[in-house]
Amino acid sequence: MLVFVGIAPQSRAFLGNVFNHTAEFLIAWSPFSYILLAMFLAGPLVSVFVMKTWPEKEEPENPLAKYKNDVPYEE
């Protein structure tokens, strides 16, 4: 469906205007907009890094394990 949006001349003009307006906004607010853009781009990378380096959860020892019989019952 996105192919048909790109084919229509009105939608191409609209998307071109959106991209031009975005570029003008980035240039007009250059220091702040670049910092904001860097935060948006770095956010997913930081979250992946945190997820990869997060320590594994250690399961607590079962308190009833010491009462467990090693030999199964024979019938």
Image (cartoon, rainbow, N blue to C red):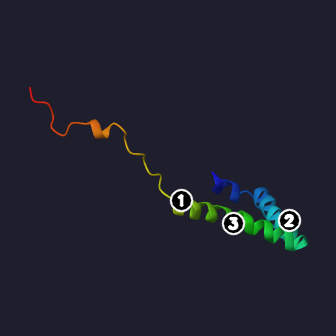
Q: Which residue is mark 1?
A: 54
Q: Position of residue 57 (x, y in %)?
A: 47, 52
Total labels: the figure holds 3
- In the image, taking residue 71 as reference, residue 14 lies left or right, namely right
Q: Give the crowd class for mark 2: few <14, some 14-19, many >=20 residues within 10 Å.
A: few
- In the image, taking residue 69 as reference, residue 32 lies left or right, namely right
- In the image, taking residue 73 as reference, residue 43 lies left or right, namely right
Compute the Cα span from label 3 to label 2: 20 Å
For marks 3 and 1, give the one nearer the viewer. Answer: 1
Name the N-terminal-most of marks 2 and 1.
2
Q: From this viewpoint, which residue is outermost toward the front?
A: 66
Proximity of marks 3 and 1: CB atoms separated by less than 8 Å: no
Image point 84% across, 70% down: which residue?
A: 26
Task: Give, as a three-letter code, the residue at label 1.
Answer: Trp
Which quadrant of the figure has residue 31? bottom right
Which circle marks residue 21 in the picture?
2
Q: Which residue is mark 3?
A: 41
- The residue tagged with tag 1: helix, strand or loop? loop
Task: Give, as a three-letter code, the residue at label 3.
Answer: Leu
For marks 2 and 1, give the one nearer the viewer. Answer: 1
- The residue tagged with tag 3: helix, strand or loop? helix
Q: Position of residue 73 (x, y in %)?
A: 14, 30
